Image: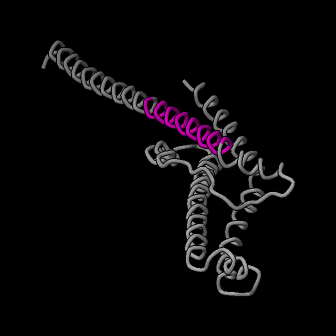
């Protein structure tokens, strides 16, 4: 083998190695670019979902303030407040965004924020279910009173209410449940407002922080 043959073989090997390295590098950087693009898309999707969740929480809080919150505030301003009555019920469907996007909470880098979002939704869900229960209690109470008035007449019914009868105890039991719910909502309302507003601020802070990442 001549020196020229060796040179030719070496050049060929170098070309093959360079081609392999070039192909590997191209594939590597293409995969990395694709991975980075996927991560960026995922980050944007998470932030978009978080913005939607924030908007829904704002809406839920406003609905509560305009309905239940106002009813409780009106009771506070009465000289002789009567907590019994029908509360405005919040229509179903107010948690649809959370139910559709709650999966992104597991991808948040702030575990405390994720926990706060979950606990806030659970709290509002519990309140709205309690309001439905309150209204069911009220309707049963009113139905019972109408039935007793029809069966006994107003004089006998009024007389029974002043004594320790089944009728009296029956109605007092419903009244106790209704008053207990109203009192519980009244006590929790300031904390509900403050903690929900704090959560909304923390969501804004997180979104702003993550939006700056390129």
- For the N terminus, the quadrant is top left
Residue 39: % across, % down: 44, 33
The foreground one among 16 and 139 is 139
Residue 181: % across, % down: 69, 64
Residue 9 located left or right of residue 48: left
Q: Tell me if residue 102 can be seen.
A: no
Tell how many labels: 0
Q: From this viewpoint, which residue is outermost toward the right?
A: 79
Which residues are the magenta region? 41-66
Q: Residue at x 39, y 29 (%)?
A: 32
**Residue 171 magenta:** no
Residue 30 vertical position relative to residue 45 in the rendered view, above or below: above
Residue 156: % across, % down: 67, 81
Q: Residue at x 70, y 36 (%)?
A: 201
Q: Residue at x 59, y 31 (%)?
A: 210
Residue 47 located left or right of residue 73: left
Residue 25: % across, % down: 34, 25
Q: From this viewpoint, which residue is outermost toward the bottom?
A: 165
- For the C terminus, the quadrant is top right
């Amino acid at each position: 083998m001549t020196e020229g043959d060796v040179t030719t073989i070496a050049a060929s090997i170098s070309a093959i190695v360079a081609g392999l390295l070039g192909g590997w590098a191209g594939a590597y950087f293409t995969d990395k670019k694709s991975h980075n693009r996927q991560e960026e898309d995922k980050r944007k999707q998470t932030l978009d979902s978080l913005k939607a969740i924030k908007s829904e929480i704002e809406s839920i809080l406003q609905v509560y303030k305009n309905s239940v919150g106002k009813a409780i505030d009106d009771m506070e301003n009465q000289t002789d407040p009567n907590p019994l009555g029908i509360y405005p019920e919040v229509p179903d469907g107010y948690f649809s965004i959370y139910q559709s996007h709650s999966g992104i909470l597991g991808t948040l880098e702030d575990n405390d924020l994720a926990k706060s979002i979950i606990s806030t939704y659970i709290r509002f869900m519990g309140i709205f279910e309690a309001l439905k229960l309150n209204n069911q209690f009220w309707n049963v109470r009113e139905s019972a009173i109408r039935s007793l008035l029809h069966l006994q007449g107003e004089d006998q019914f009024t007389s029974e209410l002043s004594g320790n009868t089944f009728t009296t105890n029956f109605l007092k039991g419903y009244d106790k449940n209704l008053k207990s719910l109203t009192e519980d909502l009244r006590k929790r309302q300031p904390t509900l407002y403050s903690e929900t507003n704090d959560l909304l601020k923390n969501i804004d802070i997180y979104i702003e922080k993550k939006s700056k990442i390129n």
